[in-house]
Each structure stands twice: as C-alpha cells, then as structure tokens.
Amino acid sequence: MRIAIASGKGGTGKTTVSAALASVWTEAVSRPVLAADLDVEEPNLHLFLRPVITEAHVANLEIPVIDAAACTRCGACREICQFGAVTILGDTPLVFDDMCHGCGACLAVCPVAAMSPGAREVGRVEEGAAGSIAFVNGRLRVGEAMSPVLIRAVTARVNGKLAALPESERPDVLLDAPPGVSCPAQNAVATADVIVLVVEPTPFGIHDFALAVEAFAPLGKPLTVVVNKAGEASPELDALCRRENLPVLAAIPDDRAIAEGYARGRLLPEMSPACRALCLDLARQLAALRPEARHA
C-alpha cells in the first residue's frame, strides 16, 4: 500500500504527518514501512527520522549531444523541440542543457543520426534506514529545475527495493510529496493508492486546499484529510469537505507545545500520550483503506 501525504501549500505540516506516521506505522498496523521523501527541492523528512544513509546514487537526465560534423543543419531537431533547447546559431548546432526536458524527440527525428544521448546530473538518490523504517529521498542539484526527473528516479528506486522482496515482506510506503499542485506534486502522488491532504484552517490554507482537491480528485484515488493546527471550528473547511465527500481522519490541535517540539525536530507521537494515540489511530484508519480491503 502506498500513501501520499500532500498539501496545497508549503508549511502546512505535511512532513510532520509523514514522520509521525512512519514512526508508529509498524506498531499500529503490524507491517513494515518505507518512508520516501519526494519533496526533492527541500527534503526535510530526514531531520525528523534521522536515518543512517548507506547508499547514494547519481540521477541523470538524458540530454542530446550533437555531432557537428555529421549534422546537416536541416533544423528538424529545432522544430520538434517544444522547449527551445535545440537550435542552430549561424552554422553552429547548439543544445541548451538546462532547457532540455529529456524527451528524446530530437534524437528520434534526426535524419542522419547526428545526435546521441548524453547525460546531465539533476540530483542524488539517497537510501538508508531509521531503525526499522526503510528510508529513501532525493536531493535536487542546486539550480536544477527538473525536479520531476528526480522524483521519478526516487520512485523507481522505491519500486526496485519492493520488487527485490517477496510480496509478503514488502513494506507499506509513505510518500512525503512536494507541496502544491503542479508537475512535481502530480508526479509524487501518481503511484499512491491513497492521498492524504494536510490542511491548515486558515483562509490561505483553505484556498490552496481547494486547489489541491481540484487537482488530485480527477486521479480517482481516495482523498482523505488531516487538519493541522486545528483550533476554532472552520465552517468553510467543513463545508468543503462535506461537499467533496472528503473524510477528515484526524485533527492535530493548534498547540504551542507541539510547535516547540516540531522546531526541535521531535516526532509528534513523542509529544504527549494524546498525540501518540492520534497518530496510531490515523495509521489504522489509513491502513483500513488498503486496496484489497476496499474490494473485500
């Protein structure tokens, strides 16, 4: 089972929920767990889980390399490129590496095979463990814009780790998604069985939550809600959840002690018996949404 923890905007407590679930998952549902940080632009799940990193792999984007001697300057590569990454300046064919999305269309249309695949590093995939919690994350290269490429590399590594295990030993996977609703977030939740949307009951939080619901609902996956910094009742948020038929599985109280614990890198279940009970209950509710359970 894969659960993506997402949010319409940054800073809503998405990583707080991801780390909390990872820390209690095995106790709550008696299954192993793998935590993957797909927020590759600003990974911070490791700050809470404190994994020991044992492997790191470079993630590359395939980019074209032009053999200027073989190139006939026909312009087919320039015409097919939607991103302006390939051009002919004067008599010189050029590739702008940072603008290339690695689609490979230019290689496919070159009539004289003057283009070959090269590579540009976009970041690194790190693996390790935090106690019994398997851990994978991605770190985007500074200045790199192609975060979906690295997100897919992290997801592929997660798939590889699961495929190497017998089905009965495969862990459940918690995906800490990047905030927002654009391509990185869509890539991060694409393989999830269930999406948890974390929301703060503020005007900005509810606005971006509504955008997230609009963006993720068409994926056809079960959407659930965790309210963070829950205080006074929010009729607008309640109405939105009712209208979209979104179950609110947990409400983390707006508590100064929780904020101070978060700032010190503490896990939510460590902060009080009530917080621990809340996290255990949330894990059990999510596990009950397992696909085979829904079809039983």
Image: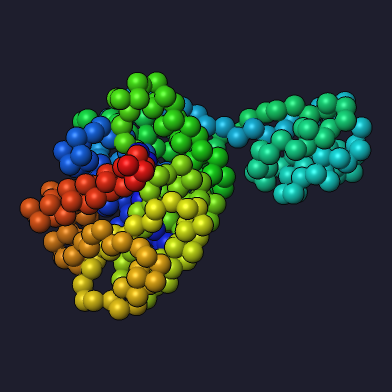
Furthest-bottom residue in view?
235
- Please tell me which residue is depicted at 45% across the width and 35% down the height of the picture: 154
- Examine the rendered structure and indicate whether residue 98 appears above or below residue 154: below
Q: Is residue 294 left or right of residue 148?
A: left
Q: Nearer the viewer, residue 227 or 153?
A: 227
Q: Horizontal and vertical percent for residue 12?
A: 33, 61
Residue positioned most to the front: 296
Q: Relative to 52, is 146 above or below?
A: below
Residue sitting at x 50%, y 53%: 219
Q: Is residue 208 above or below residue 163?
A: below
Q: Residue furthest left?
A: 273
Quadrant where the C terminus sits is top left
The answer to whether one can see residue 140 in this image is no
The figure's colour scheme reads rainbow
Residue placed most toward the observer, 119 or 159: 159
Q: Position of residue 98 (x, y in %)?
A: 65, 43
Q: Residue at x 23, y 68 (%)?
A: 230
Callout count: 0
Q: Nearer the viewer, residue 139 or 225?
A: 225
Q: Residue 271 location, x and y as percent?
A: 12, 53
Q: Is residue 112 left or right of residue 142?
A: right
Residue at figure coordinates x 10%, y 56% from the top left:
274
Is there any visible trace of residue 21 in the rendered image? yes
Which quadrant: the N terminus?
top left
Q: Quadrant of residue 80?
A: top right
**Residue 281 shown left or right of residue 292 in the figure:** left
- Image location (x, y in percent) of residue 93: 83, 37
